[in-house]
Image (cartoon, coloured by chain):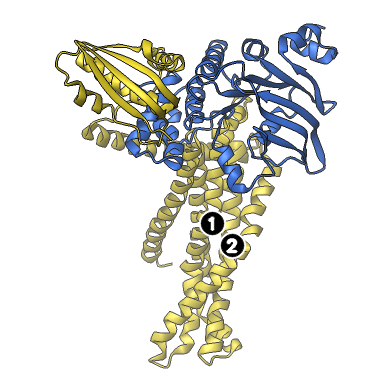
Amino acid sequence: MATAAAPAAAREVHIAVRGLTMAYGDFVVQRDLDFEIRRGEIFVIMGDSGCGKSTLLRHMIGLRRPAKGRVFYAERSFWDAEPSERERLMRRFGVLYQSGALWSSMTLAENVALPLEQYTDLGPEEAREVASLKLALVGLAGFEDFYPSEISGGMQKRAGLARAMALDPEVLFFDEPSAGLDPISSRRLDDLILELRGSLGATIVVVTHELASIFTIADNSVFLDAELRTQTAQGPPRELRDSSTVPKVRTFLRRGEA
Amino acid sequence: MPAAELSLETRGDVAVVRLAGIWRIGAGLPQAARVWEDAGAAGVRRLAFDASGVTEWDSGLLTFLRRLARDCADRRIEADRSGLPEGVRRLLALAEAVPEKETARGGPPAPFLARVGGQAMEALAGTREFTAFLGESALAGARLVRGRARFPVAEFMLVLQECGANALPIVSLVSFLVGLILAFMGAIQLRQFGAQIYVADLVGIGMARDMGAIMVGVVMAGRTGAAFAAQLGTMTVNEEIDALRTMGISPMEYLVLPRMLALMLMMPLLTLYSDVLGILGGMFVGVSGLDLGAMQYLEQTRAALSLRHFAAGLFKGSVYGVIVALAGCLRGMQCGRSAAAVGTATTSAVVMSIVLIIVSCGVITVLYDVLGI
C-alpha cells in the first residue's frame, strides 16, 4: 500500500517495457513490444487467443527471461539487476494466477500468511491477523480455516487475490481474472479491482480478453496481434474502439462488428 | 525514521487516539490493548481518531484499527473514524462489508466420536469401492474376451513397454543383489558343515519359489503402480476421465484394462528374468568366495530345481501383478480433485500394493504347503 495520500496528478512511469522480444527457442511469440504503465493505473494487456498475453505477463513478473529488450520498474531494469535485487523487486509484485493457484494442502489463512511469515518478522499470531484482514478485504471473512477445495471457483480466485495482496504490493498482476467465472462474480471481481486501486493506490496490470471487463476497469491498454506478432495499438480502450486506425483492433473491441 | 507513535487524550467521555509516524508492518507497531490501558476505560463512550501525523501506512495500521474496532464493539464504545485517512476508511469499510451468503462445504472439526465413526464408515466404503472396482474390471475383461470392448492397442503397447522393457535395468540390479545377499547369508551357515555347494540349492529354490516374484512385485509397486495412480489421478483432476465418460468411452476399458493386462502379462516374464539374475548373483558369490566352479554351481542348481518351483513362483508373480495394477488403477480413479490428492493416491497405491503382496504371499505359501506343491 502506498503512502498516505498518493496525489493522482503525480503519475510517473512505474513499469516500462522497452523493445521486448519474447521467444520459445527459435519461435518468436511477440517482438518489439514497447509501452509504459503509470503509477496507480489499471493497465490491460489484450489480444486474441494465443497472441502471447500470458507469456508477456510471465516476462514481466520474472518467470521468463526476454529474448531481447528490457523491463523497467521505476527506471530499474529488472533483468539486468543482481539476483538478490530481482528477488527484492519481485516481492513488491502480487500475482493472481489464472486458476488462483492456491496451495491445496493449506487453509486459506495459511496460504495468505505464508509470504508474511517468510518475508516479515511477524509472529504466527500477527501474520494470521493480517491474513484475516486480507481475506475480509476480498469478502472472505470467516473462511480462514477452509481448504481451497472446500470453496467455489470464484471464492478461490478471491482468496488468490488476498494472497497476492499479502505483502502490500506496489504492483498487482491479474492473469485472466474473469476466466471461469460467471458474469456476476466476474463483475464483482472488477468492482473489487477498482476499489482496491482507489484505496491502495497500487498499479494494476490485467491480462484479459473480456470486453465488458476491459471497458469497466481499464485506464490504458495495449493490443497484441497474434498474426503480426507485435503490438498494433496502445491507448485507452474506449478511444481505440472509436477511433483506432487499425481495423483489427476496432473489430476486436466491437466484438467482430467492424 | 520516526517510528509509529500512539497517544491518547481524554476529554470527558470522548477519547481521542492520536496516531503519528510510520505505520508499516514490521516497524514495531504498538498493541491495540495499550489504548485500553491508557483510556482507563471508565467513562469513555466514544473513540475518535486523529491520524494527521501518519506519514506512511500499510496493512499494519489496518490490522491495528481492526482489532481496536473489535474491542470497541465488545465494550459498546462508539468509534468515530472521520479522523482517519480516506484510503484507510474505505479499506476498513470493504473489510467489514458483510460477505454474501456463500455455499461452502467443511466447517468446524467434528467431535472425537463422530470422527471415529466417520473413519469406520470410510473404511467400509473403501472396501465396498474396492470390491466394486474388482467387479467392474472383471466385467470389462469379460467384454474384451467376447470382443465387445473397445481396446486401445496403441495405449496397451505403450504401457507394455513402460512396465516391461523399461523396468529391466532396475529389476536386474535388484535381483542380482538379492541373489548375492541370499548366497552370502547361506554361505555363512553352510560353511560350518563344509556344505558350501548347497548355496546353489538355497539361492535357486529361494529365487524361483519366492524371492524373484516378491522383489519384482515390490519394484513394480514402487515403479509402475505409483505411475498408474499418478497418471489416472492427474487425469481425474483434469476432468479427463469425465471427458471419456461423457463420450461414452468406459475408462475401465480404455485406461484400466490395458494397464492391468500389460502388468499381468509382464509380471511372469519379469519374474522369470529375476530368477535367472538372482541365480547369477548367487553364482558370483559361489565362484568368487566359496571356491566353487561355475559349471559345478550351475549343475547343482539344475539338479535342485524342477519346473514345479518355477511354476509356483510364476503363479505368485501373476497374482502380484494383478494386485499392483488393481491398487494403482483403483487409487488413481478414486483420486480427489487437488494436487495434494494425487500425492495421497500415489502413496496409498504403493502402500496398499506392498501390504497385499506380502499378505497374499503368506496365504499362497500356506496353500502350497497344504497342497504339497
Mark 2: few/some/many CA within 10 Å (<14, 14-19, 20+): many
The colour assigned to chain B within the rendered structure: yellow
Say whether residue B14 is visible.
yes
As drawn, the label of residue B270 is 2
Residue contact between numbered discs 1 and 2, judged by CB atoms under 8 Å: yes
> Does residue B229 appear left or right of residue A107 in this picture?
right
Mark 1: few/some/many CA within 10 Å (<14, 14-19, 20+): many
Question: Horizontal and vertical percent for residue A227?
Answer: 84, 26
Q: Mark 1 lies on which chain?
A: B
Q: Distance between the residues labelled 1 and 2?
A: 10 Å
> Does residue B9 appear left or right of residue A28 in this picture?
left
Q: Which of B26 and A234 is in front in this view?
A: B26
> Does residue B177 appear left or right of residue B102 in this picture?
right
Does label 1 or label 2 sit earlier along the sequence?
Answer: 1
Q: Name the residue under label 1.
A: B220
Going 22% across and 16% down the picture, which residue do you hit?
B10
Question: Horizontal and vertical percent for residue B84?
Answer: 39, 15
Question: SS class of the residue under badge 1?
Answer: helix
Q: How many labels does the image show?
A: 2
Quarter of the image where one finds residue B274: bottom right
Residue type (three-letter) at the residue carrying disc 1: Met
Looking at the rendered image, the quarter that the C terminus of chain A falls into is: top right
Q: Which of B55 and B185 is in front in this view?
A: B55
The colour assigned to chain A within the rendered structure: blue
> Does residue B226 appear left or right of residue B51 in this picture?
right
Question: Horizontal and vertical percent for residue B346?
Answer: 49, 46
Q: Which of A109 and B9 is in front in this view?
A: B9
Going 48% across and 33% down the picture, which residue do you hit?
A167
Question: Horizontal and vertical percent for residue B213?
Answer: 50, 63
Say whether residue B141 is visible.
no
As drawn, the label of residue A111 is none
